[in-house]
Amino acid sequence: MAYRSYYRTYPRYPMQYPIIFGCASGVGEGFLTNLSFSGCTVLCDRTLLVGVEVRVSVLLPDRTQALSIEGGTIKWVDGCHFGLHFQHLTISSRQRLNRTLREALIHRLKMHPGRKGCWESYPWL
């Protein structure tokens, strides 16, 4: 198992939503591949650098308008994948994010009713 020099406070839920992001080097698009209360993983069409600050718009399934992440920081990069930590969300964006993750958790619990708890996702604890 590879050593990680960081840990996640919140579990990430697998999802796939279109995403548009902008940073100092330009604009890109891709797919959000998982999501948590504090960040996400993105598969995109370009390689970015760790530490870059980005603005993000995610098209969620409710299709009302894009979820806007005003500020995020890229924490890791692996080819065309990167991990984004959310820095700044408006109250309405935080509420939409919370609603989306609550629905993902409910779906996960319905799909795996016999699981003992979320700690099984963290074998190193």
Image (spheres, rainbow, N blue to C red):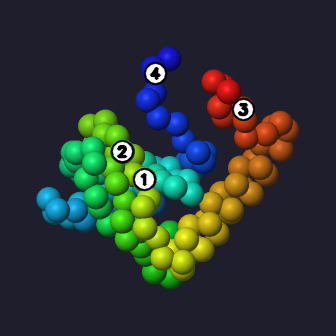
Cα separation between marks 1 and 3? 23 Å
Cα separation between marks 3 and 4? 19 Å
Q: Nearer the viewer, mark 1 or mark 3?
A: 1
| Name of the residue lying farthest toward the bottom | 64
The amino acid marked with disc number 1 is: His
Residue marked by disc 2: 75
For image coordinates 45% across by 80% down, the residue present is 65
* Mark linked to residue 3: 4
The amino acid marked with disc number 2 is: Lys
* Mark linked to residue 120: 3
Instruction: Tell me the crowding category of disc 4: few under 14, some 14 to 19, or many 20 or more residues within 10 angstroms, Cα based.
Output: few
| Secondary element at image label 3 | helix
Which one is earlier in the sequence, the residue at label 4 or at label 2?
Answer: 4
Instruction: Tell me the crowding category of disc 3: few under 14, some 14 to 19, or many 20 or more residues within 10 angstroms, Cα based.
Output: few
The amino acid marked with disc number 4 is: Tyr
Question: In the image, is residue 98 above or below residue 105?
Answer: below
Cα separation between marks 4 and 1? 20 Å
On the image, the x and y values in percent for residue 100 come to 61, 65
On the image, the x and y values in percent for residue 101 come to 63, 60
User: Do tag 3 and tag 2 residues touch (Cβ < 8 Å)?
Assistant: no
| Secondary element at image label 2 | strand
For image coordinates 64% across by 69% down, the residue present is 99
